Image: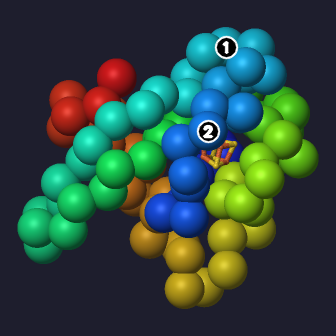
Amino acid sequence: MAYVIVDTCTKDNACVDVCPVDCIKEGVFTDSDGKVYDMLFINPDECIDCGLCEPECPTNSIFAEINLPPELKHFARINREAFASGQVG
Ligand code: SF4
Ligand code: SF4
């Protein structure tokens, strides 16, 4: 499991400062359907599930993957593919 950022992120970088493993990265990811996500993303291969980032987010845009609301579940894939595709990292 990992933490996940969703597209209400305003890119204020508050989460980046508290992440102990520096796995939160800003970037632009274009999904296979052409939708563009310009936000911050969490690398699920590096996130250690410490939870420190979640309370820092002023827009409540960070969720533990298991706590993602149904309408936001696809952001687990989007965060993962942002890095796996090489578009972010
Ligand atoms: S849960 Fe911890 S390791 Fe994962 S992104 Fe947040 S601060 Fe970083
Ligand atoms: S703290 Fe929240 S709004 Fe700010 S950059 Fe991180 S995810 Fe985006």
Q: Residue at x 53, y 42 (%)?
A: 11
Q: Which of 66 and 59 is in front in this view?
A: 59
In the image, is 63 to the left or to the right of 24? Answer: right
In the image, is 18 to the left or to the right of 22? Answer: right
| Label 1 close to label 2 by CB (< 8 Å) | no
Q: Where is residue 73 in the image (x, y as percent from the top left)?
A: 53, 73
Q: Which residue is drawn at 32% across and 56% down?
A: 37
User: Which residue lies most toward the bottom here?
Assistant: 71
Quick one: SS at disc 2? loop
Q: Which amino acid does label 1 sit on?
A: Val
Quadrant assignment, res 80: top left
Residue 1 in the image: above or below residue 53:
below
Task: Kindly identify which residue carries mark 1.
Answer: 21
Q: Nearer the viewer, residue 28 or 81?
A: 28
Quick one: SS at disc 1? loop
User: What is the total number of numbered labels drawn onto the structure image?
Assistant: 2
Task: Kindly identify which residue carries mark 2.
Answer: 12
Quadrant assignment, res 89: top left
Q: Which of 45 and 23 is in front in this view?
A: 23
Q: Which residue is drawn at 34% across and 50% down?
A: 38
